[in-house]
Image (cartoon, coloured by chain):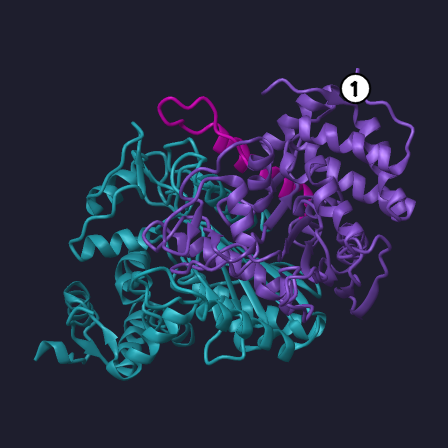
Chain colours: A cyan, B purple
Amino acid sequence: MEQRPYISWELAEKFMIDVFKAYGVPEEDAAICADVLLESDRRGIESHGCNRFKPIYLDRIKNGTLLPETKIDILKETPTTIVMDANNGMGMVASYRMMEKLIEKAKIYGMAGGSITNSTHYGIAGYWTTMAEKAGMIGISGTNARPSVAPTFGVEPMMGTNPLTFTMPTDEDFPFNFDCATSIVQNGKIEYYERSGKDTPAGLVVTKDGGTMTNSGSILKEMRKGNCALLSRGGAGEETGGYKGYGFTTIVEILSAALCGGPFMKELSGKDEEGNNKMFRLGHFFFVINPEFFMGLDTFKETAGGICRGLRASEKAPGEERIYTAGEKEHLAWLERRELGVPVGEAIQKEFIALRDECALDYRFPFED
Amino acid sequence: MEQRPYISWELAEKFMIDVFKAYGVPEEDAAICADVLLESDRRGIESHGCNRFKPIYLDRIKNGTLLPETKIDILKETPTTIVMDANNGMGMVASYRMMEKLIEKAKIYGMAGGSITNSTHYGIAGYWTTMAEKAGMIGISGTNARPSVAPTFGVEPMMGTNPLTFTMPTDEDFPFNFDCATSIVQNGKIEYYERSGKDTPAGLVVTKDGGTMTNSGSILKEMRKGNCALLSRGGAGEETGGYKGYGFTTIVEILSAALCGGPFMKELSGKDEEGNNKMFRLGHFFFVINPEFFMGLDTFKETAGGICRGLRASEKAPGEERIYTAGEKEHLAWLERRELGVPVGEAIQKEFIALRDECALDYRFPFED
């Protein structure tokens, strides 16, 4: 790992809460949002943590495309389902309230499902599925996002990077947690490459002429203009299964919009026809499944853990040292970072200092010494 | 499409039912099984249709690893969930009964989930999810299978090709139907290559030394010995997202075994330690979600259809004529085959003639003239 300064989890959390509050987010909501962002850093998913604090949340509050106060309307509720309207407030707050309710429903009914419309970026999908897992249940979630991904045989950015995330209890120290975009990479990774001054590997992005691009800054700019697009997992064409990644991306696009009756694809660009900012109006979905309504949680955990252990113990390819299961790298990142704290690269250090000054907060960061 | 003789759907169905009956399958069950297999041919998925009638079902009834009579025990039932034991009977029959019950539950409760243990090959996963779709609901299903797929950085066949299948209603002539293995290809495709005398494309299979294999017959033989394995979607390593395909394969392995408390991975080989046949003891899972418990079926259909139409109308890569959405090719196959009938290649013709003679049935096939 590259040498970077770290700041303590407590400091980062307190600071983010204070900044969110200065931006008008109520304290209880600010605590939820800071925890979601820091959970991403805890898991080593830096593309979705402190890295996105300013550009994806604070800047949007400032430009009016994200409301700091989250007014939630329940559009429909049944014993097993809920549809919420987040009214362009904090997607993380609405998602937190949704998961609290779905877990209660799944305790009683075994299965529960929810969808949120008129929402905003909800952080890592795995935060929501892990809420279910901590309650001894299976969590499934996905969200649409700004159009970035081209369909198989296409070149136009049509769909979001659309994670389809599952977290499931095991009898190990950490759950099975599969949390990633259905495209080969997500926008956050390219933003992260850009902020780290790195190129994006070839073959992840398709241009209108069917070629590829690697300059991370140009990719982000041209994608928003519709001039290039991310490829689905499996790559271009059909031979290597690219159409399967495309299928999963589409499943998430449909579930995110069709359950709540919200907008989709190009309507989620965050820009109107004149190129002015508008509300993102994202949609998310959540399913919770309670193993106690099947053969019991203990059976579930033991089986899931047994599968993970069996996979890790299987024969490795020549030159490979280790086989991982989903969620293991995130757990290892946490074990390493628990004491070290949150890694803050140069770009984040500058942002934190500027935010402190802007909000007139009384902090002094260790990296300033 | 290559020139092949076709036989009528009615003839194929009647013949398959009669053969299943001659093998001891009760008439009502035989009708279900024939319909599942022919539905695969209707959709153009020849790897799972008539092609598998003899090797995967009849031969297994004969060698005792598949019982023609399906005794179903309900291990657990709640208002929203069911766990069944299929007692090594016909997986297709147990799955049919499961879906009938789950659809009824989802009509009342909005969500339903089921799992089957001690089962056998259940045909195309899309048959079960389409039962939900025909009832105006979302169907999700998956199954484990004989170990064939290696984890990322591994070379040992550990998991099944494990489809994760979604069918969702649209306002079009056909549903959104995403039905495929989470590996790049499934075993049925390699069986189909073998029967057609074709090689398997390079890069789909990994050998113990990290290389690849293309001889389809050798792949099937060596995989059962554990000497080669299928790769997950995305291919080997992590750069191109292979670990994401691996994650989905693992999700299906867990859900198929952990909800019903059944066996997994190497235990599903169908062979005991001495290499003798044993019961496969497969597990399947099924979820049904009723859009009427969210913002309504009409809203769901219109949104899902709108997404599919938007994708198909988006800009094509240079040289590409058409963008498809999941389920469209299956629908086109049906439109073409509806009048033509079931395509029966040479291998199937021979099997049908032999089966007729073996069962002393009174059929004369058009391809015999």
Q: Which residue is mark 1?
A: B368
Q: Is residue A351 magenta?
A: no
Q: Visible in this render: residue B133?
A: no
Structural crowding at the residue carrying mark 1, measured as other residues with C-alpha within 10 Å and reported as few (<14), some (14–19) or many (≥20): few
Count of marks placed on residues: 1
Q: Residue at x 54, y 61 (%)?
A: B251
Residue situated furthest left in the rendering: A369
Q: B244 and A23: which one is in front?
A: B244
Label 1 is found on which chain of the structure? B
Vertical arrangement, residue B229 with respect to residue B283, above or below: above
Q: B327 and A320: which one is in front?
A: A320
In the image, the segment drawn in magenta is B296-325
Vertical arrangement, residue B223 with respect to residue A212, above or below: below
* Left or right for A65, reference A134: left
Residue situated furthest front in the rendering: B274
Q: Is residue B317 magenta?
A: yes
Residue B345, position in %: x, y?
67, 26
Residue A10, position in %: x, y?
29, 83
Q: A209 and A125: which one is in front?
A: A209
